[in-house]
Image: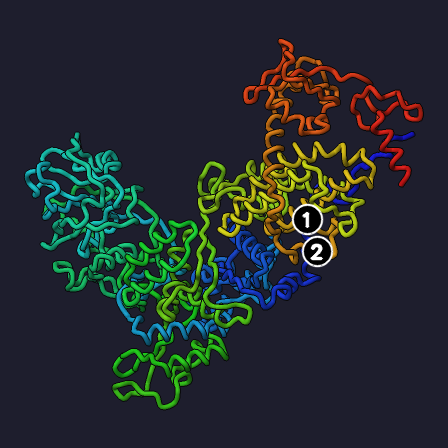
Amino acid sequence: MDYNKTLNLPKTDFPMKANLPVREPEILKKWEEMDIYRRVLEKNKGKEKYILHDGPPYANGDIHIGTAMNKVLKDIVVKYKTMRGYDSPYVPGWDTHGLPIEQQVIKILGVKRHEMNPVEFRKVCKDFAFSQIERQRQQFKRLGVRGDWEKPYLTLDPEYEAKQIEVFGEMAKRGYIYKGLKPVYWCPSCETALAEAEIEYFDETSDSIYVKFMVRDDLGKFKGIVEDLSKVYFVIWTTTTWTIPANLAIALNPEFDYSLTKFGDEVYIIAKDMIEEVRKETGLGDYEILATFKGKELEGMKAVHPIYNRDSIVVLGEHVTLDAGTGCVHTAPGHGEEDFLVGQEYGLEALNPIDEKGYFTDKAPGYEGLYYAEANKVIKEDLRKANALLAEKKITHSYPHCWRCKSPILFRATEQWFASVEGFREEALKAIKEVNWYPAWGEERITNMVRDRKDWCISRQRVWGVPIPIFYCENCGKPLINDETINAVKELFRQKGSDAWFEMSAEEILPEGIKCECGSTKFRKETDIMDVWFDSGSSHAAVLETHPDLKWPAELYLEGSDQHRGWFQSSLLTAVATRGKAPYKNVLTHGFVVDGEGRKMSKSLGNVVDPAEVIQEYGADVLRLWVVSADYTADMRTSPEILKQIAEVYRKIRNTARFLLGNLYDFDPDKDMLPYEELLEIDKWALYRLNRLVKQLTESFDKYEFYDFFHPVHNFCVVDMSSLYLDILKDRLYTYPAKSKERKAAQTTLYIILDTLVKLMAPVLAFTSEEIWWHMKHDRNNNFESVQLADWPQVKEEYDNPYIIEKWEKLFDIRKDISKALEIARSEKKIGHSLDAQVDIYPSSELYEFFKGFEDLQYVFIVSKVVLHDPQEVAPENAYVSEDYDLKITVTRAPGEKCERCWMYSETVGTIKEHPTICARCASHIEEQLKV
């Protein structure tokens, strides 16, 4: 007889090799055919809503690994929440305006911006944006992200733009919008402000000067260190000599160390880490460090401007680095973005002594009428006369130039539109406290940013965006904005889109008969557009309030940690300013993706990981598994080596599922399921471990700690299942009669495990869980077309059986000692396979009683025979001694012959005439099988 044919060996069509790059697109196609997104929404229709609002990525280029991580995390949230019974639609969006798209249109399409009228240029930008949306849409779908991909929200949609105008109008109505000064790129040759897209960088030879600012007021902190403050100087470095007349402050980094460094008779305040560099660049000699302070300890000190007898105050700024210079940064708020921002924090004037043609005005006494570039020589001479020029030389460096005339540009403070954060800051800070922040440090981070922010510059001198809906009186120049004008623009944009602003005159847009306070009826339109952060920051109003499937506020915003400064903040500010509260209840942030060594990814380092390449090599599910492989609230590491390890973990999880499927080929859950009470104790132990996994994942997922999926699921599959339960179970599954109660108990347990595990996997391993689901049988109450339509597993109290847990956990702990003893015997060539062995156990009295509570220990230890000795019996001298239990173990070759069917050694082999090569147990199983 061929005894192999009497065994219940695994059978399944579920392939061992995943081949995900080929199989996943097939699954995607099936999802589209069944319209899985709508099916899920229909299932949970009318239930409590859970809205994750999508932060819109720029419609610009292929997605990168960080974008992929973000979208996968969002998908995990939405899939988990829908399985928990929430109505959780996901409406993806795109940010379609602004500089990134203008740059790409100019760079990739070779568009000559100034040779096109605004309407033509905007059309090119729009077409480019749509092409990128389609590109990214397919890439996001390939990741397995489920959403309303056919009806996303776009910031260029007329309805969206109309809602954005409404938000702007409401902020203006409440007095939060005003016009003020801000530095911008300025071309003195073309006499115009420039957008960043209109800047080109060329090498330029400039002065490199080190300038001394004498300390006037040290706040008493140098007392006892230096006697004469007239000999103490802050030393700054600059390559723009012409900005020295506009200096109002010296910026330090709050966390850097700054040393009072004595060179000869003078003491210079320089960042400690830059002393050697400064000494080398200036030719100074030996020095002595008198004292060292943190930058924040020097805040508020006053130095003397080297040319004008006015204060230059010491301020703090995170923009200060140690890349070059002294660590003390010359600050002219009218001539630089960072200078202006830090100046705003300290209430400094945006002093700009240069006119639109590049000539000094009377705001820079002594230099009036001088062209800025020609003034450099005069300013240096004045510094030298004032004993303030420590060193000078020429350097060649990259410098911004006007893309049209190729002339070097300068920075000038010009009038811009602002939102006054000061006007509603306290309400914003209160709203922050009402939000749950994950991780918790996010609250402090955004709080500090909002607390320190006075204004938000919302105007941009560009064309591709939503126009600022303000008109100016041609007679008196006063801005015109009120409910009437806002409504006119809003309705115009709703009907025709914001292109209409550029196509129509002010007279055609404004309501008939509208007048300025001066009586004039002639108006011109504002030419600036809104900051794109105002665009995306209005999405809570334009999307959450208007989309029929969504609601305001959202339950969750989920983006990278840089969005505390970006979308989280712009959304908060527009919402608080117009609605009095935050547009979100919870905010979850993730870190950035870095390489395996923790370095930032860059093409120059050659360490960029392309998600498309990962999917092509491993499949999207491996990338999705990587997303939850570590705590993503910090920076996430990835590399080819890391992904290879993730793929190996994926393989083990897949193989566990395949084993479960293979042993359920003849199991009908509607007919063959046994009640919990009829399961064997070891089966109940397996269900306890499963229940523990359900509880752990549910608690973690509820807290958005999806990284708790990776190790628990991996350990459950590899340790609890493959190394323990499934290994022990093979004998019962393969050798017992197919319809025996023992085998049905095992299959019942396997079915519960597989059915639960595939649902736990579904939010993360979207494709593989679906593949498993389509290969398994389902009971009549669970026979959904997709695992995404199933419910999340519930924790079952009956599985937490304290007696079973304590008993079997202890036995499996002792089993480690049995395995060690078997390994020693194997190394000594006493046995080959563990089934060659007889294990003799010499326990204490207590353990003896414990072991007597088990039957058939040989199956648990996977040996052929176990002999339990009386506690009084003395173990042989060469017995293995347990370190953790009062227990000794010996291993010898099992008596009898090897059974051809079950491979266990038995003294009954050869005693059954009809079956001379198998054991009595197997013979009885065959006879029982033949009766069925």
Residue 644 seen in the current view: no
Is 895 positioned to the left or the right of 534 in the image?
Answer: right
Q: Which mark is residue 304?
A: none
Q: Quick one: label 1 or label 2, which is nearer the N terminus?
A: 1
Is 629 positioned to the left or the right of 634 in the image?
Answer: right
Which quadrant of the structure image shows residue 709?
top right
- Percent x, y for residue 369? 17, 63
- Percent x, y for residue 303? 13, 49
* Labels 1 & 2 near each other (Cβ < 8 A): yes
Kind of residue at badge 1: Asp
Determine the residue located farthest toward the bottom in the rendered image: 513
Residue 87 seen in the current view: yes
Q: What SS does tag 2 mark?
A: loop
Q: How is the image coloured?
A: rainbow
Task: Answer above or below: position of 2 versus 875.
Answer: below
Which quadrant of the structure image shows residue 338?
bottom left
- Most foreground residue, 402 or 575: 575
Label 1 belongs to which residue?
755
Instruction: Give the spatial CA distance, label 1 vs label 2.
Output: 9 Å
Kind of residue at badge 2: Asn
Label 2 belongs to which residue?
782
Is 922 positioned to the left or the right of 555 in the image?
Answer: right
